[in-house]
Amino acid sequence: KKAKYYLDGKQVTLDPQGARLIDEGILDLLDPEHMPDAVGGMSIGADPITAAIVTLAGQRGLPIKGFMVRKEH
């Protein structure tokens, strides 16, 4: 099914303060006792979010890795 609207998340995810708010929010929502091994999603859209999360995770000493999912050609 095709959506009737488009939300351009790049306006927030590619902004330094927007990316910081997103990655802090996501990391703060994760359960410290059940932290995932990795975070990621579909390339290109999830790439800036993934990068921001793993960067902050590294600063917090959390061993979270990132991954990207590509479409097959």
Image (cartoon, helix red, strand yellow):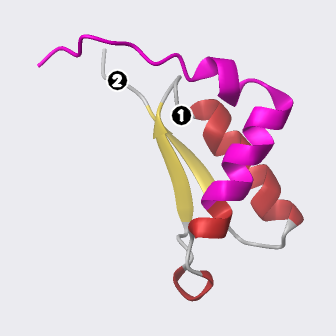
Q: What residue type is disc 1 on?
A: Ala
Sooner in the amino-acid sequence: mark 2 or mark 1: 1
**The N terminus: image quadrant:** top left
Residue under the image location 71 percent in, 71 percent down: 63
Disc number at residue 58? Answer: none
Is residue 46 found left or right of 13 in the rendered image? Answer: left
Q: Amino acid at mark 2?
A: Lys
Quadrant, the C terminus: top left
Residue 4, horizontal then vertical, whole percent: 24, 10
Establish if 21 lies above or below 35.
above
Q: Which mark is residue 46?
A: 1
Q: Nearer the viewer, residue 34 or 26?
A: 26
Name the foreground residue: 72 vs 30.
30
Report whether 5 appears left or right of 40: left
Q: Is residue 71 left or right of residue 48?
A: left
* Position of residue 55 measured from the top left corner of the image (x, y, whole percent): 80, 51
- How many marks the image carries: the answer is 2
Residue furthest left in the image = 1
Mark 1 surroundings: few (<14), some (14-19) or many (≥20) residues within 10 A? some
Q: Quadrant of residue 52?
A: top right
Say which quarter of the image contains residue 32.
bottom right
Q: Which residue is mark 2?
A: 71
Residue 32 falls inside the magenta stretch:
no
Give x and y (percent) for residue 54: 72, 53
For this orientation, the residue located farthest to the right is 59
Q: Secondary structure at mark 2?
A: loop
Q: Which residues are magenta?
A: 1-26
- At x 41%, y 28%, the residue is 70
